[in-house]
Image (cartoon, helix red, strand yellow):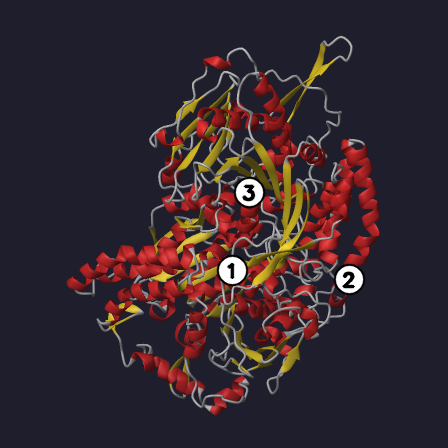
Amino acid sequence: MRLVVALYAYALLFPIIGVNAAQRPLTVDSSLGIDNVLDFSPYGPLDALSSQEFTTLTHPLVPDYGVRVKKSKEFCDGTVNAYTGYVDIAARHLFFYFFESRRDPQKDDVVFWTNGGSGCSVAVGLFMESGPCRVTGPNATTFHPDSWNEVANVFFIDQPIGAGFSYADYGENVVSVFYTIHILTGHICGLEIKSTTEEAARDIGAFVFIFFEHFVAFQGRGFHMTGESYGVRAVPAYASYIIDQNKRLVQAGAVPINLKSIMLGNGCSDYSEMIPSLYNMQCEHHAVLPVSNISTCVSLKRMLPRCERWLEEACYDTSDAINCQAAYDFCWQLARTYLKTGYSLFDVTKKCESTNRKNGCYPEIQDIFHYLSQPFIQEKLGVDQYPGKPRQLSECNEEMMSRFGTNLNHAFPTWYYIEQLLERNVKALVYAGDVDFACNWIGNERMTLKLEWYGREEFTSKPLRGWNVTSISGEHESYEAGLFRSTGPLTFATIHGGGHMAAYDRPKESLELFRRWLDGIELHKVALAIMAWWINRPFICCAQTLDAKAYGYYSSTSRARHTKAYVEIKTLSKNYQGYHHEDYLHSAFLGPWCRENVFDFSPFGSLDALSSHEYTTLRHPLVPDYGLRVKKSQDFCDGTVNAYTGYIDIAARHLFFYFFESRHNPKTDDVIFWTNGGPGCSSAMGLFMENGPCRVTGANETSFHPYSWNEVANIFFIDQPIGAGFSYAEFGEYVSTSEEAARDISAFVFLFFEHFVTFKGRAFHMAGESYGGRVVPTFASYIVDQNKRLVEAGATPINLKSIILANGCSDWSTMLPSYYDVGCEHHSAPPVINISTCVALKRMLPRCKAWLQESCYDTTDAINCKAAWNFCSQLAYAYDATGFNPYDITKKCEGIYKETLCYPETKNISAYLSQPSIQEKLGVDDYPGKPRRFSQCNTEAQGRFSVALDQVFPTWYYIEQLLERDVKVLVYVGDVDWICNWIGNERMTTKIQWKGQEEFASRPLRGWNVTSDSGDFKTYEAGLTRSVGPLTFATVHGGGHMTPYDRPLESLELIRRWLAGVEL
């Protein structure tokens, strides 16, 4: 299904054009009469409104309209009164918010704000930009000190019908009825029905009139209409309608609206200028360095003249709908090439920051609509419960975008309205954040320069000059906040560092611009000291060479990292949709992505042809920064099959791996990737204690393991990240997040499958234990995204079938609280923590949950998250004090934990792998600083991941996305594990949001059985399971953290059935 952002981008930049291309006819508007105004009595003060129910207001001059309004106590801004309500037009209902000014609500001007789309909710403007609070998570808001209600009373309105909480009964939408009148006879000849901004303007004009008429304190108050993005198409039309309406109000004896100005923020009011400016923004150095490569820019420049001519002729000189659509499709190349760079449509300095691109690259948007979808919030606001109301409020209404697009609404010459407003001395401020791409400052400036009005000559002759503000940091120095040009009622301004949502990126500068505009102060006069924006100005990595001088401003300490990132970013993106932002931001993966190099590649061939005496080094032109060294390790661990070991080399980083062929049929069996946890713990524990082909039984010996997973599959064991096991790095290099590690793993898997062609297309499964529950979904997601680019390059994608999360910790928001359940309640075993401690833990549990959610998930506040983590760690300390094994609640810890991890076998494994003869057989490198004794876990690697808060990343988001793409997910847990227990894992599986969530969560757990191999062949219950579609959750009775160690038969049977696609 096409993502909302793709539709939004296309609708915003290159709208869908309909088939109705007739010239707009004359209209008859009979909504205002003059005979019954004296029958009207105003309501009175706003403060008298009820907070419990709506008060309905009408006016005889607009009998088809009503306004329902209520006080919404302490909503969003507890310092002022807030109101919400609906504008009712028969079966149509427009929702609005109104916030009084913090400065002086009795005297300050009134501002009307709307967002774009068309069909996008004003909630983004309210909660991310100019509103009095910001949503900081699905359940939390925070006071916004730079809200525009600092200096004005502000409306926010969801328009047109279908946007946000606005809706219609009976499928109605914004419908215009235009009566064509014969020029001679005056008889009505016919009518047309359209979805247009002009019809929406009638609703807004009536609403504003009713509000001002009933709340007389606002009559005569300065009124300003502002819009953003597509809202800039709407606001000039709305303002023009109000000006025309004012004449009729005066004739009827009513008070006209004192419309002072319109403010157009990062708007697209003239596509004939905006579309060509997309070339300038990506191919010329204006606010930032170019982001598209030279060859692309040359092609775009060649097509640009044709694009401009075609648009003008088909969309403006005439209204040829079919030809206009073709012109937009042709010009779409200007946006398509930019989208391929991976940069945000709304900020040319940033890679897309959201794993879900329908949020427009801003993760906060998802939180906003989760927040507004909550029943108690909707109850507070008085949101109507109407048929067809969605459970989850969405940012934009795709259907509404299409309706407006089918009527040439985008192609309407909105600047005609602006010209007429200027001729009537209605002020117009056109401002733009200078790093927006979609509705950029270049296109907006060109629009202002071409406006035909009485001050045009003087306006166009003036150069742009700086407007300054004063920093409150340091010496209160003045700095340039942007550029501007102004003559009479028209002002054009830029905001340095502001994107499409300038008030989001530069809140203090935006508020100061707004304050001066309302107060009539020229922009070049400093009125308020505010924070300097450039202190943390984002790094721009767009140079065409690796010369440091070409990079502009950035921290010298990160030069090397950003230099590498530039080379990788410059040539990467082949598809805009569906990539995790880390793919773009750091993507070492795939280096220079050149189709022609694929055909220069020759695979190595057969694994069996590898030497057992030295490494064979393998490379691929698609991943030139990566190398794969591999050798046969004869008679290692399992003498019945071939074993291989080697390294993945990434410059100074080297990841060690083992590979064992299947005992069943290595040429046809699936391939499993296994990693242990930590982070920083070697997969040797999995190999030699759990599911590998041998078990270490002493410092110098191993024994055959009959329940190894290579009974049914070929299997990798990998020491990752850098620092784990035999993996190492020179020159202090390392990785500190799972996303960084994922790039290395995805490249390794690609290299292996490309060279050993017998594995191409073979089913591939990624499995991980413990912290592997964090990394494996990340690794798998990278492989899914990598597959798209492999296909485009003509390479074979990895046939990723499933992920297997074995006693994993994928969601600490459910896992940490579950420590109480396992330690203090009787589930798989009796409680082990004493009663007084359990009582204390239960008292602190609600605070733990809330604090974790607020500080680690709703927001990413590193200091507060760490504090919440430390607070919740009381749950772990209480268990540690019992002396029980954290990996098995039925046993006491054997030995000193730091030495044995409660399992004495681990000392034998370390001793075995520390032997020079074993390391020589494996081909372990001798490197500077190599420890004399093999270590199971690297605490330094653990520390790096912890500092980066890697553990609190919402990994279940990856799981959701994999499920949505039908990658199977098995979450299995030994039911006597404590540290990554079955309760926390089950809660995670029932909360993840995917297409089968409701059905999965509704099913009960049921038993799954196996047959004993002890001679009696009895069937017994091995655990519990729940399964729907691609998702399965299972427990293994009596299994601890290392379930294949405690229950080898049951674990192997579980995997056998999973790989075979047999239900448990």
State the image quarter where residue 103 is shown. top left
Q: Is residue 1016 above or below residue 125?
A: below
Q: How many marks?
A: 3
User: Whole-percent x and y of residue 936?
Assistant: 41, 80
Report helix, strand or loop for mark 1: loop
Tag 1 or tag 2, which sits nearer the N-term?
A: 2
Instruction: Say which of 481 and 489 sits in front.
Output: 489
Disc 1 to disc 3: CB gap under 8 Å: no
Kind of residue at badge 2:
Ile
Kind of residue at badge 3:
Leu
User: Whole-percent x and y of residue 31?
Assistant: 58, 17
Confirm whether residue 1021 shows in the render: no
Q: In this view, does 717 lie above or below 766?
A: below
Query: Which label belongs to residue 518?
Result: 3
Q: How crowded is mark 1: few (under 14 residues within 10 Å), some or many (20 or more)?
A: some
Label 2 to label 1, Cα distance in Å?
Answer: 37 Å
Residue topped by disc 2:
294
Residue topped by disc 1:
531
Tag 3 or tag 2, which sits nearer the N-term?
A: 2
Camera-near label (2 vs 3) is 3
Kind of residue at badge 1:
Met
Report helix, strand or loop for mark 3: helix
